[in-house]
Amino acid sequence: MTTELGWEGYRTFLVDRREAESETVTSFYLVPEDAGVLPSFRPGQSLGFSLDLPDRVVPVIRNYTISNSPRDSSHYRISIKREPPPANQPDQPPGVSSNYFHDQVQVGARLQVRAPSGQFVLRPEGKGPVLLLSGGIGCTPMIAMLNAIVDSGSTRDVWFVHGVRNGREHAFGASVRAAAQAHDNIRAHICYSRPDDGDILGEDYDSAGHVNAELLQSLLPDTSAQVFLCGSMPFMKALYNDLIERGFDEFQIVYEFFGNACELREPKPKQVVADMGLTSDVEFNVEFRQSGVSASWTPSSGTLLELAEANGVEPDFVCRSGMCHSCLSVILDGGFEYIHDGVVTPMGDDEVLICSARPTSDLVIDV
């Protein structure tokens, strides 16, 4: 059933068109196959995808941010960066889902899509200054937020600060500059870490190097802005802590990871034990079957995802809140339960979102 607020489970969408945004980023425009209602969304939210890849026994679950404004009611747009093998592990395979989209998802392709969800959102009608701060493909929610602010007619002060390697990888540069030139309340600063010879300072980018606290201090007159932060793990950790040290209110810094992520603040095991209502002597064995790793879980271990990370297992994830389904895994044996409300539970009884679950017995997971 589809309503203006969304739909249950997966719905079939068609790729209406695809468009290159840079040498590494491509946008996919999606329309519902049933030609029914296209629910609105809040800028910053994402769509969940169940991808049937030729060489995979089970679907690959991924989450991609909607990169256009809610005003664009005829379609959803997602913008995906082709992910190469890790720079320090060139013999490893490239990003599974991103390369699938780039190489195989053409116009007319059918995709299974979950309704927009997520809490990393901006209210375009909000008051006060806002800093949209991103690195690499972390710009996609910021583009949605920037366009939504423009579409709402808001006059709030907006800084769009983005770091990327060079012009070949820079997506949406022209549209961001056009928005800044057309609206006195919007300012943009683009930072290239390794500009090419053909990149023009003052036209393609505004400074060379990395986005850091010193740059932000030179751009923003004060620290009162609400901050939306999105990018890689090193980018996030460095800027999050620097922003707080520079006087930004940590409760006004809203963030979301793209790609590999981690908690920006260290968890407090004693508080986790209290929240779960467990005694500290509870212990279960958790086997991550595909990884060949077994680990002992106690209440201080936190979630199944945190246990995996602590033992060298690196499952996919994005939101850590049970919304995006990027961490969806299959239970081969044992029981589990979710540790907080608001989890968008999977359809299968043998499926678990490990970012928000803990074991209730010895457990075997197909990870």
Image (cartoon, rainbow, N blue to C red):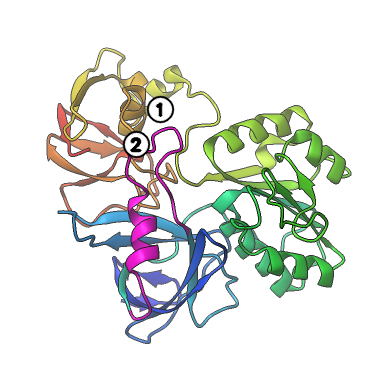
Residue 263 lies, with reference to residue 132, above or below; the image says above
Residue 25: x, y in percent? 51, 61
User: Disc 2 on helix, strand or loop?
Assistant: loop
- Give the overall secondary structure of the magenta segment: loop
| Tag 2–tag 1 contact (CB < 8 Å) | yes
Residue 10: x, y in percent? 29, 67
Residue visible at 54% across and 46% down in the picture: 256
Residue 271 lies, with reference to residue 202, above or below; the image says above
Residue 119: x, y in percent? 52, 52
Residue visible at 71% across and 52% down in the picture: 197
Q: Which of 253 and 60 is in front in this view?
A: 60
Q: Is residue 99 something one can see in this rendering?
A: yes
Residue visible at 34% across and 25% down in the picture: 277
Q: Mark 1: few, some, or many residues within 10 Å (few <14, many ≥20)?
A: few
* Residue at which label 1 appears: 275
Residue 352: x, y in percent? 25, 44
Left or right: 197 with respect to 203? left
Left or right: 167 with respect to 87? right
Highlighted range, magenta:
81-108
* Residue at which label 2 appears: 339
